[in-house]
Image (cartoon, rainbow, N blue to C red):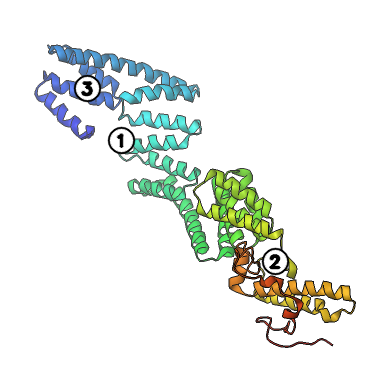
């Protein structure tokens, strides 16, 4: 059952009752060897050899003595290498010992220290977790595991492990101090994520700024916080700030797919379609199966193509995230300015008519939520080609068809006759 600690007292009692019970002594020697208690194991194997063993028992005892002697030599090498800061050499020796002494908690802790020194915290965690099970009340192992997870940016696992330490010793000073710090950070992050789920991006940004102030020494929290702030700014349609913060993240992590997607969305709002396409393509290289990336790339490509034709936002001089009120206001101003009745010269009148048709078309599309959504997705609802051959194009209406509507109406363009003096 792998419960060597429970087995040892029984084997010891058997040997006390029957000193020449070589099978029990051999079995105890095996367990002691697995636990790394080399001197005690050797003592059992030597006593087996002195107690008239069977041929098989003699061979087994001699074989285990040779193995134990080899483990003693490797342990000395590992300790010397560790003292000399040659952590790679120490790991090589410890790897060989732990193949035999699989239940030696101290050697696992020593290898964990070597891994930490060599910048391999996840391997260290694996050894420390084993050590925490092999040694009773191993608060030190739980504390180290918690701090390692924290350094890796995994605050939830860090909190879980430090709680294990406090279960064993609620007055453990370092565990309690670490617990308070991690709990505070964890609460901030959970609160920020809840705000993001609720669409409260400004408040979430503020929370993540607090995360960076709470833990400035661990770079992982700064990177993750900036990554989420980048996301909030992009979703909150603050493209200039989003591009700046996302770019900071991508300087530290050029392959960060989340930052690439969020910066691409911000580029779309800023009508920087080439840059958006480049970010989506880079993100796709690292995550080919992400549907959001695929859809974003297709949208950016459509918008780029659309921008080379007619851009209703540019016609009205408004941003892509403009509210309906802004669109109506811009439309009224331009309709007054470019109404053909304002122009007497024939050439100027023709130019004004064309401009006026564009302005009216832009207002028609952008003030209708359904048509605007189509346009925002890269499809021109007034373009027959974009509609894939669905009848004549309303976009090519003549000036006469646009005459007689009220530029000050907030509805469709065909309500009232309107004359300029």
Q: First in sequence: mark 1 or mark 2?
A: 1
User: Does residue 252 appear anywhere in the picture?
Assistant: yes
Tell me: residue 250, above or below residue 238. above
Image quarter in which the N terminus is found? top left
In primary-sequence order, the first of circles 1 and 3 is 3
Dots 3 and 2: beta carbons under 8 Å? no
Q: Quadrant of residue 44?
A: top left
Residue situated furthest right in the rendering: 345
Residue lying furthest left: 18
Which dot marks residue 29?
A: 3
> How far is mark 1 from mark 2, CA to CA?
64 Å
Residue 201: image location, x then y, percent: 57, 63
Residue shown at the point (31%, 15%) measured from the top left: 69
Q: Where is residue 404 drawn, in percent x and y?
A: 74, 85
Locate residue 382, reporting x and y percent. Answer: 65, 69
Q: Which residue is mark 2?
A: 319
Residue in the foreground of this view, choosing between 245 and 266:
266
CB under 8 Å between callouts 1 and 3?
Answer: no
Q: Circle 1 sits on which residue? A: 134
Quarter of the image that includes the C terminus: bottom right
Q: Is residue 41 above or below residue 108?
A: above
Label 1: state its secondary structure. Answer: helix
110 or 88: nearer the viewer: 88
């Amino acid at each position: 059952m792998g419960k060597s600690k429970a087995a040892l007292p029984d084997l010891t009692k058997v040997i006390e009752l029957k000193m020449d019970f070589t099978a029990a002594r051999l079995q105890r020697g095996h367990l002691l060897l697995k636990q790394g208690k080399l001197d005690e194991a050797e003592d059992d194997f030597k006593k087996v050899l002195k107690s008239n063993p069977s041929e098989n028992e003699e061979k087994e005892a001699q074989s285990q003595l040779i193995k134990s002697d080899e483990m003693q030599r490797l342990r000395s090498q590992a300790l010397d290498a560790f003292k000399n800061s040659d952590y790679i050499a120490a790991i090589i020796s410890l790897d060989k010992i732990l193949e035999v002494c699989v239940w030696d908690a101290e050697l696992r802790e020593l290898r964990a220290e070597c891994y930490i020194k060599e910048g391999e915290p996840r391997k260290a965690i694996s050894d420390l977790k084993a050590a925490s099970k092999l040694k009773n009340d191993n608060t030190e192992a739980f504390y180290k595991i918690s701090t390692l997870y924290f350094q890796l940016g995994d605050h939830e696992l860090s909190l879980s492990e430090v709680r294990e330490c406090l279960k064993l010793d609620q007055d453990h000073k370092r565990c309690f101090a670490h617990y308070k710090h991690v709990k505070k950070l964890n609460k901030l992050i959970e609160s920020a994520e809840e705000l993001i789920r609720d669409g409260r991006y400004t408040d979430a940004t503020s929370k993540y700024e607090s995360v960076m102030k709470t833990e400035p020494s661990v770079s992982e929290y700064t990177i993750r916080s900036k990554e989420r702030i980048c996301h909030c700014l992009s979703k909150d349609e603050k493209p200039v700030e989003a591009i700046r913060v996302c770019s900071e993240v991508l300087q530290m992590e050029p392959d960060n797919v989340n930052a690439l997607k969020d910066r691409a969305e911000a580029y779309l709002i800023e009508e920087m379609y080439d840059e958006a396409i480049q970010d989506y393509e880079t993100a796709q290289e690292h995550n080919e199966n992400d549907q959001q990336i695929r859809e974003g790339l297709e949208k950016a490509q459509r918008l780029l193509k659309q921008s080379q034709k007619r851009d209703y936002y540019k016609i009205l001089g408004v941003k892509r995230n403009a509210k309906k009120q802004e669109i109506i206001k811009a439309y009224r101003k331009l309709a007054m300015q470019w109404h053909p009745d304002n122009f007497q010269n024939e050439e100027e009148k023709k130019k004004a008519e064309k401009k006026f048709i564009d302005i009216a078309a832009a207002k028609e599309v952008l003030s209708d939520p359904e048509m605007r959504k189509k346009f925002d997705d890269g499809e021109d609802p007034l373009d027959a080609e974009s509609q894939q051959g669905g009848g004549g194009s309303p976009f090519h209406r003549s000036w006469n068809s646009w005459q007689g509507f009220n530029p000050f109406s907030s509805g469709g363009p065909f309500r009232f006759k309107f004359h300029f003096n």
